[in-house]
Amino acid sequence: AQICDFFEAHEGSPIHQLSAKHGMDSSELPGGDLDIPFGYGELISRLAQPLVDDGTIRLGHKVVSVETSSPRKHSKSVASEVMVRCEISDGDEQVFRASSCIVALPLGVLRSGLDPSHSNGPLFSPGLPGSVSDAINNLGINVMNKLELTFDSRWWPRGLGWLDIGSSLPGRSPTYHPFSLFLVESEATPSKPEAPNVLVCYLTGEFAKRAEQWTDAEAQEECMEAIRRADFPAMEGSAGEVPDPTGVHMTRWLSDPFSKGSWTFLAKNSGLLSMKTFRKDKECQKRGLFFAGEHTCDGSRKGLDIGTVHGAWLSGEVAAKRVVGSN
Ligand SMILES: Cc1cc2nc3c(=O)[nH]c(=O)nc-3n(C[C@H](O)[C@H](O)[C@H](O)COP(=O)(O)OP(=O)(O)OC[C@H]3O[C@@H](n4cnc5c(N)ncnc54)[C@H](O)[C@@H]3O)c2cc1C
């Protein structure tokens, strides 16, 4: 059960859906670990802000369709035109035209865009080549959510790092892990008395899907019940009792229309070829379509790791070089 727990927590998916051949394939990058003050979002905001300020990144533009001119048969070079239609506010839209486009939409959004009953119609027109839509459908999309709980005072032993609750449930385990892993995201210390006391509970796989249906208040109630059942106050250095949190927030990456899942995993019937297809499909390239994002990372170079931030970043650089090379 512990091995299942470990893989499922890492991959965010029930073990019976994971490819036995792949998984945990990431390369090790040089350099040590760093803590980013105020969280990871701070890094992204700082990198993106200058581009938002100069208008290169347009926030509030929801891509609703990507239209391309069909490639001419047997033609090696054809002037492609890509037309990207965006919804910007109620009813308003803006259209962007270019000779090439790097599509960095997440895999879940791409998959829902293939669905003919999609609210805005198909995302790609004409439809994507079969090999690319197969890759979109065959790769796995996992669910990992965070339930963040803020407490007025720290009740866990100082400097703990994380808390684990054995998650075996009669009839449910080993592929169902309610409230098993908590990270101490922040805690007040004598040198930082103003720091908030925050525990983040990682919810994975089938349990994460179920939890998305709860309100934040319901999730808090269920989670606090699990924490109290675990009898943490018995730990050395714990406060006598666990207080109620003063703040709660849960992510819902599967229901979020801008993610529709957390990240990609290699499911039973998929392999590295599925990711390579995104980067190498010739028909897409003739149409001026290039793909980037964590789901396009096939490990073919160091750092091009599926399901990671650095992989997503590198895939963007690789795609940009291809666009430059194709023009
Ligand atoms: C809980 C959790 C923990 C993780 N931990 C780690 C970790 O420790 N290390 C690590 O390396 N990775 C981690 N990851 C994975 C990492 O976050 C992803 O691999 C990475 O963010 C993927 O980047 P991306 O650019 O491919 O996709 P995204 O970050 O999803 O970016 C896609 C962008 O497209 C936008 N978008 C979606 N639809 C539309 C639309 N229709 N129109 C316009 N824009 C749209 C979205 O808003 C988003 O900004 C974690 C993920 C989760 C959920």
Image (cartoon, grey):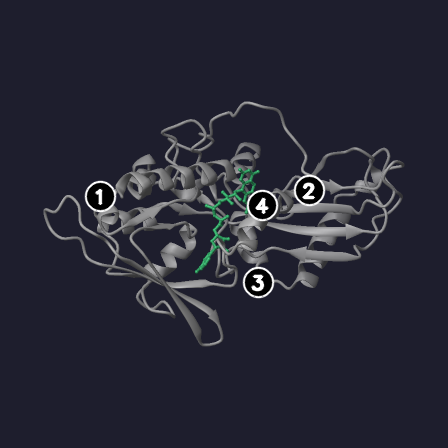
Is residue 46 in view? yes
Q: Secondary structure at mark 2?
A: strand
Q: Which amino acid type is shown beneath numbered disc 3?
A: Gln
Position of the C terminus, as image quadrant, is: top left
Query: Would you call the spot at circle 3 few (<14 residues within 10 Å), some (14-19), or many (20 or more)?
Result: few
Report the residue marked by disc 1: 282
First in sequence: mark 2 vs mark 1: 2
Q: Are marks 2 and 1 in contact (CB under 8 Å)?
A: no
In the image, 294: left or right of 271? right
Q: Are marks 2 and 4 in contact (CB under 8 Å)?
A: no
Q: Are marks 2 and 3 in contact (CB under 8 Å)?
A: no
The CB of the residue at mark 2 lies under 8 Å from ligand 1: no
Query: x%, y% of residue 103?
Result: 37, 51
Report the residue marked by disc 4: 44
Tell me the CA gap for discs 2 and 3.
20 Å
Comparing labels 2 and 1, the label whose residue is closer to the camera: 1
Q: Which amino acid type is shown beneath numbered disc 4?
A: Ile
Disc sitting over residue 213 in the figure: 3
Query: x%, y% of residue 250?
Result: 64, 56
The quadrant holding residue 240 is top right
First in sequence: mark 2 vs mark 4: 4
Residue 192 or residue 177, whichever sits in front:
192
Query: x%, y% of residue 120?
Result: 37, 69
Residue at the extreme bottom of the image, as rendered = 91
Q: Are marks 3 and 1 in contact (CB under 8 Å)?
A: no
Tell me the CA gap for discs 3 and 1.
41 Å
Report the residue marked by disc 2: 182
Tell me the CA gap for discs 2 and 1.
45 Å
The CB of the residue at mark 1 lies under 8 Å from ligand 1: no
Tell me the CA gap for discs 4 and 1.
32 Å
Is residue 265 in view? no
